[in-house]
Amino acid sequence: MTKILPFLCILLVAVSSMADTSPNVVFIISDDQAWGDYGFMGHPQIKTPHLDKLASQSLLFTRGYVPSSLCCPSLAAMISGQYPHQSLITSNDPPVIKGKKSGGNDPAFIAGREIFNQHMDKLPTLPRLLASKGYNSFQTGKWWQGNFNRGGFTHGMTQGSRHGDAGLTIGRESMQPIYDFVKQSVSENKPFFLWYAPMMPHQPHTPPERILAKYRDKAPTLNMAKYWAMIEWFDETCGELLDYLDVQKLSENTIVVYLADNGWIQDPEAPKYDIRSKQSQYDGGLRTPIIVRWPAKVKPQKSEALALSIDIAPTILRAIGMEPPKEMTGLNLFDEVAVHDRKTIQGEIFTHNSMNLEVPSASLRWRWMIEGDYKLMVPYAANEPDAKVELYSIIKDENEMNNVAAENPDLIKSMTSKLDAWWKP
């Protein structure tokens, strides 16, 4: 017995150490992809076998949303767990100054972007909070807020330009920087957080011919075929990343999150988005499947409960035993009871160029809310003076074509009251 006891002690310590191992975290974020444009969401033509497999292994929320359908505020909401009106990152770009060209090397544009970057500096972002627990973090792909370290990442590719400069080579050119980072983290015995946000299937739609050939005769236009092929190309890169985690035996204790930053409904006559998709208050811009996989802890399940991208940061923090900051008001997506009991989600749409970098209501266009089967959209008169309140039964009217506001004044009053309680500008 005396010989066995030391062995049992060593075994118990080893088991305890394994149980306490912090999970790795991988964010996979597609860019400009409509919520139905996946195999697992029922698209009849587009092939996404790797994301289909991921969805089958995960907690899948088919009714996921981002709070705002512009790229910059949407991504900021994911990493901060805060609504744009909280973070003050509401728009893609700073104000347009009369008589000046916006963008590029214009000093006023650069100064405006720097204010957005300073807002990011102040946020308790996921990488910053994970660093306190010993995590390495790596930014790749789309990133608007200056150098990667402005978001709290310990490692990264983007040096400071508007969309992401060197970071945008990920996926389209190579996955090697990710593999190198993972190897380094493993060699240092550190858990890691990976931000994989390639500008895919975002324009330019330049898929390999081997993939485009599959869709030339299936899509209504060549432009649509290119968009569909871009989605399959993006899916391929996701497969490469997920396979790498498998080969390195990291998948079991890695939380993988997937969603899109905003939607995309392509104009069938031209290679551009439809007005009801990105930048809009409609589901074509806001809705996205949200996938969360953690084989060590969470069983696969398909859910029709409402989920929001601001839920992801607090979910991750609670998974590693951290209490989220009070600014993170999202739910823990692993808490089935809390998610089931939630009755409403809300969001906000802002102008593409900010009207005031310090006052979010100055740039507000719409507030929206979903309660049960209904979605309410309330215009902000200062920026949408001719718009009317819209209400849709989004379960029956998935494409939001039949505005039923006139027939439901009491419901509008009730929902507007709840929207005001959330945020009244």
Image (tube, rainbow, N blue to C red):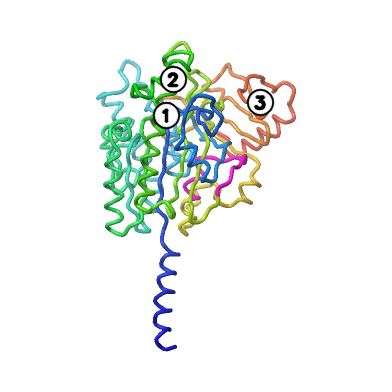
Q: Sort mark 2 into few (<14), some (14-19) or many (20+) by Cα contacts within 10 Å.
A: many
Which residue shows up at 60% across the image and 40% down it? 306
Quickly name the residue at label 2: 215
Could you tell me the amino acid type at mark 1?
A: Glu
Question: Residue extending furthest bottom?
Answer: 2
User: Taking 242 as reference, is 218 above or below it?
Assistant: above
Q: Earlier in the sequence, mark 2 or mark 1?
A: 2
Instruction: Name the amino acid type tagged 2.
Output: Tyr
> For numbered disc 3, what is the local secondary structure?
strand
Residue at position x 42%, y 22% from top? 214
309 magenta-colored? yes
User: Tag 2's secondary structure?
Assistant: helix
Q: CA distance from mark 1 to mark 3?
A: 32 Å
Going from N to C along the chain, the mark reached first, 1 or 3, is 1
Q: Residues within 10 Å of mark 3 (few under 14, many from 20)?
A: many
Q: Nearer the viewer, mark 3 or mark 2?
A: 2
Residue that label 3 marks: 392
Q: Which residue is mark 1?
A: 232
Which label was assigned to residue 388?
none
Q: CA distance from mark 3 to mark 2?
A: 33 Å
Q: Which residues are magenta?
A: 300-315
